[in-house]
Image (tube, rainbow, N blue to C red):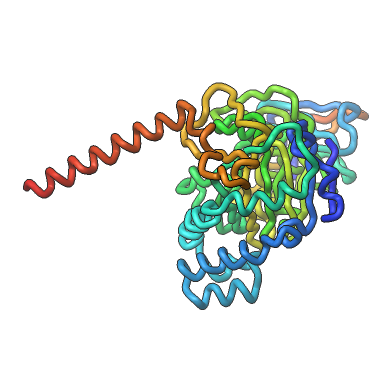
Amino acid sequence: METEVLAPDSYDRISLDDVVRGKVAVLTGCLQHAGLFDDVVAATLDVVEDVGGIAARAAVERDGFEKLHHHMGMEEAIKVRPRLADRLSDDVVGLVSPILAGLGRSARSPYICGQVYVRIIMPEDIVAGYRSRLRGEAGFLVPHSPHRDSWFSQGTNSINLWMAVGRVSAGNSLLVYPDVYHTDQGRSGNLVHPGEPLGRPVRYELSPGDVLLFHGDHVHSSEVNITEDTRYVITARVSVGAPKYNNKEGSSWVPYYHWGLAESRLRAVSSMRSRATVAYLRRRVLSRLSSTLSRGSSTLSRGK
Amino acid sequence: MPAVPENAKVVGRVDVRDVPVGGIVPVSDRVCVVRTGEGFFAVQRICPHAGADLANGYEESGRLLCAWHNLPFDPRTGQSPLESVRALAVYPMRQTGPQTYEVLDRDR
């Protein structure tokens, strides 16, 4: 597998079509070049302050995100992650669009996933005590085991934009397994079976602001954090054309925005295609059912 | 390498011609042998971090790395850099021929 390392003047040498065919690319200094880095840092520090107070904000600003665990415990990180993800997701098109704009043209218009993911992996000796409690946080607060994203009901044409906000080093990186890109693996649930050979993984050392692009159907995992630094990255997803799913559309629906429409006056209808799906209808029905039940329950409470 | 108990049970055998430098071979359900630049070492196969098969790992700079999360172990001692992960069991080996070794159980 070839990894392209591209400086800002050559981002257009890679297209999403190349990535969805297996190529991996590192766009160096991309968040700074796209004018996004300072906003992401400011949003992060705001949430750190909301959760940990002004002293935590000042300390993280002084020491860097790599030393987040010196100024916040895991309990606070558990609160920071979803709050920050929600905040960054509010303008996901504004986050992803400038990155897409710099790439080479792809044959079909990209769709931007409406969810931004925040990944804060503290050193493993801190994380280890929380691993059983944080099973649902694999890849977000604890290391993820080898998987393909489509096994988690993401599209098979999904691409990850893995954005380093803090430094990513050997010993706390992402692992990609190029030898098994186009092969079948035995599975244990949504993960590769622990006995399956995967070949030698490739890991990526990134500077703050670098963006790694890779196909979600590459088998990938988290490197267990053996460094003394916290690894902080955010990720977004795009699909090349509308998302295509293996068997199901996903148990938790998120909107996908047609990039061309999202950047036009038709932005309001840019997620229409993702709303014309069974997953969306299921979510609507469950949401209505839940609010009906909740109204019924509060009526009963008042009647007591 | 741990000392060899006199009545040690044989848990596996290895012909070193089958193991190039950097190679790892399983010798039983629970033991694999890794060859580094320093020699041959028999260690437990199941990674104590997340349960992956270390026979599918790789060797780098004298360390055995689990391919699942890239956790490195020193095959001479079984130690990883993490306090939260217990060391690998390291098994004694006994030479039985010019190119052959037995891996012996460490509990007998």
Q: Is residue A217 left or right of residue A114?
A: right
Q: Nearer the viewer, residue B96 or A210?
A: A210
Q: Is residue A51 left or right of residue A226?
A: left
- Residue at horizontal 61%, vertical 37%? B51
Does A83 appear above or below B28? Answer: below
- Residue at horizontal 58%, vertical 30%? A151
Q: Nearer the viewer, residue A155 or A75?
A: A155
Q: Quadrant of residue A44?
A: bottom right
Q: Nearer the viewer, residue B84 or A237?
A: A237
- Residue at horizontal 55%, vertical 31%? A153
Q: Position of residue A76 (x, y in %)?
A: 47, 62
Residue B88, can we see it? no
Quadrant where the N terminus of chain A is found in the figure = top right
Residue A240, can we see it? yes
Count the marks: how many?
A: 0
Q: Position of residue A154 (x, y in %)?
A: 58, 33
Q: Quadrant of residue A71?
A: bottom right
Q: Is residue A36 left or right of residue A50?
A: right
Single out the residue that lies furthest toward the left: A304
Does B81 appear above or below A294? Answer: below
- Residue at horizontal 12%, vertical 43%? A300
Q: Position of residue A233 (x, y in %)?
A: 64, 55
Does A125 appear above or below A41? Answer: above
Q: Nearer the viewer, residue A132 or A295?
A: A295
Single out the residue that lies furthest toward the right: B98
Q: Position of residue B78 (x, y in %)?
A: 71, 47
